[in-house]
Image (cartoon, rainbow, N blue to C red):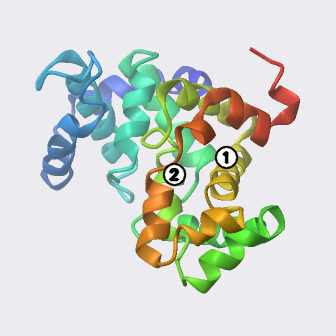
Amino acid sequence: GKVKLQQNPGKFDELDMSPGDPKWLDVIERDLHRQFPFHEMFVSRGGHGQQDLFRVLKAYTLYRPEEGYCQAQAPIAAVLLMHMPAEQAFWCLVQICEKYLPGYYSEKLEAIQLDGEILFSLLQKVSPVAHKHLSRQKIDPLLYMTEWFMCAFSRTLPWSSVLRVWDMFFCEGVKIIFRVGLVLLKHALGSPEKVKACQGQYETIERLRSLSPKIMQEAFLVQESCPHLSSCK
């Protein structure tokens, strides 16, 4: 993001001053209060956090008008704004959308569908029990992995785990998102006892939406997804 900022001086200010497409502005406006509503930055409607979030998301729709706005970009931008000013957050969002998760936020979601298929294929090697259960239940990967991947787990994991996963994500790329997803699937559905407790589609999806706190802990996720990093604090 820093390189993009240096390569495009004044670009964010130019986009920030532009009026924007009303079609996207209305949708963005409706999403602002849903992003981390208990965080002090975003708690008040019209507060500086929500204002900066609006600015960053509006700027992206002007920077990439062919893509416009996708709701999953809002939590990504919100996390970035907790750590940097709006201009830097904008260029980091651009990098995530273009380099780290390309195609994830396009209208047809083709990239996320493809990565869902890849995740499911990898699951067969990582946890045959979980793979067999999801196959038997005919549960499409998009039903459980879309929010995980598109929001980079920012709406799934506890905050300390989100920060740790993002650190690894920025260092190693999208493979970290896959690894964390596989860890969650393996430990949520990877034993006969766990599968037995999820007899139908509804119970299985609920299990994946209400994950055990233990498997979402920062130390556990690092140890399971990146053993070579588990000693790093």
Q: Position of residue 95 (x, y in %)?
A: 56, 38
- Which three-letter amino acid code belongs to the residue tagged 1? Val
Q: Is residue 148 left or right of residue 33?
A: right
- Which three-letter amino acid code belongs to the residue tagged 2? Trp
Q: Secondary structure at mark 1?
A: helix
Q: Residue at x 44, y 69 (%)?
A: 203
> Residue 148, labelled with which disc?
2
Q: Residue at x 63, y 33 (%)?
A: 165
> Residue 180, labelled with which disc?
1
Q: Position of residue 122 (x, y in %)?
A: 77, 66
Is residue 118 something one can see in this rendering?
no
Q: Quadrant of the N terminus?
A: top right
Q: Secondary structure at mark 2?
A: helix
Vertical arrangement, residue 13 with respect to residue 60, above or below: above
Whether the residues at callouts 1 and 2 have beta carbons within 8 Å, the answer is yes
Counting residues from the start of the chain, the first of labels 1 and 2 encountered is 2
Q: Is residue 225 left or right of residue 107?
A: right
Q: Quadrant of residue 57?
A: top left
Label 1 to label 2, Cα distance in Å?
A: 9 Å
- Residue 214 vs residue 61, the one in the foreground: 214
- Residue 24 vs residue 130, the one in the foreground: 130
Q: Residue at x 55, y 70 (%)?
A: 141
- Residue 230 vs residue 171, the one in the foreground: 230
Q: Position of residue 156 (x, y in %)?
A: 46, 43
Q: Is residue 98 left or right of residue 50?
A: right
Vertical arrangement, residue 13 with respect to residue 181, above or below: above
Is residue 74 something one can see in this rendering?
yes
Q: Is residue 13 left or right of residue 189?
A: left
